[in-house]
Image (spheres, rainbow, N blue to C red):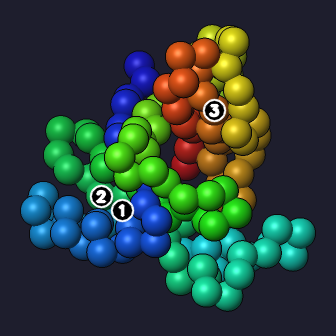
Amino acid sequence: MAQLNPYIHFNGNAEEAFTFYKAAFGGEFAALMRFKDFQNPEHPFPEHEANKIMHVSLPIGGGSVLMGSDVPEVLGTVNENENRSKISIACASKEEADKLYNALLEGGTVEMPIADSPWGSYFAMFRDKFGIEWMVSFDYK
């Protein structure tokens, strides 16, 4: 069965926030990747964003994982007075990821179509027809 995990976006202070969450929840980061770790000549990140957090995950017990990232300037800034979270679904199979992606996307808009990602998972980001933001992923490992 799919697992749901909160995913929080920040305007450049994800590392500070997740250091705070790590102190509050305890444990260690399962992942911490920066934009510079995934430089792509076709879609370069500005030098001043290279050390910002592309993805961070912190297991918080009971199988739950708190995840987040900084929003690259090219995507605009996060309005911190509005919803700035996505619901992340970790699927048990590629087929489950496709099924949930297609079902939840009906009437919605794609931000990143489902496909293999540079970090090794099968991944998509989108808004459903109600404006709720979702991420669907299947980790091949």
Residue 25 visible in image: yes
**Badge 2 vs badge 1, beta-carbon distance below 8 Å:** yes
User: What residue is disc 1 on?
Assistant: 30
Say which residue appears at 79% left-offset and 75% top-offset: 44
Q: Which residue is identified by label 2?
A: 58
Q: Of the two numbered discs 1 and 3 on the same chain, state the one appearing first in sequence.
A: 1
Quadrant assignment for the N terminus: top left
Residue 124: name its quadrant. top right
Residue 60: image location, x then y, percent: 20, 50
Q: Is residue 107 toward the left or the right of residue 32 in the image?
A: right
Asked if residue 7 can be seen in this view, the reply is no
Q: Which mark is residue 126?
A: 3
Pick out the residue farthest to the right. Answer: 42
Q: Nearer the viewer, mark 3 or mark 2?
A: 3
The residue shown at (31%, 49%) is 66
- Give me the C-alpha separation between circle 2 and circle 1: 6 Å
Give x and y (percent) for residue 11: 46, 65
Name the residue: 17% across, 46% down. Answer: 61
- What's under tag 2, amino acid-wise? Leu
In this view of the protein, which residue sits in the foreground, 130 or 62? 130
Local secondary structure at mark 1: loop
N-term mark: 2 or 1: 1
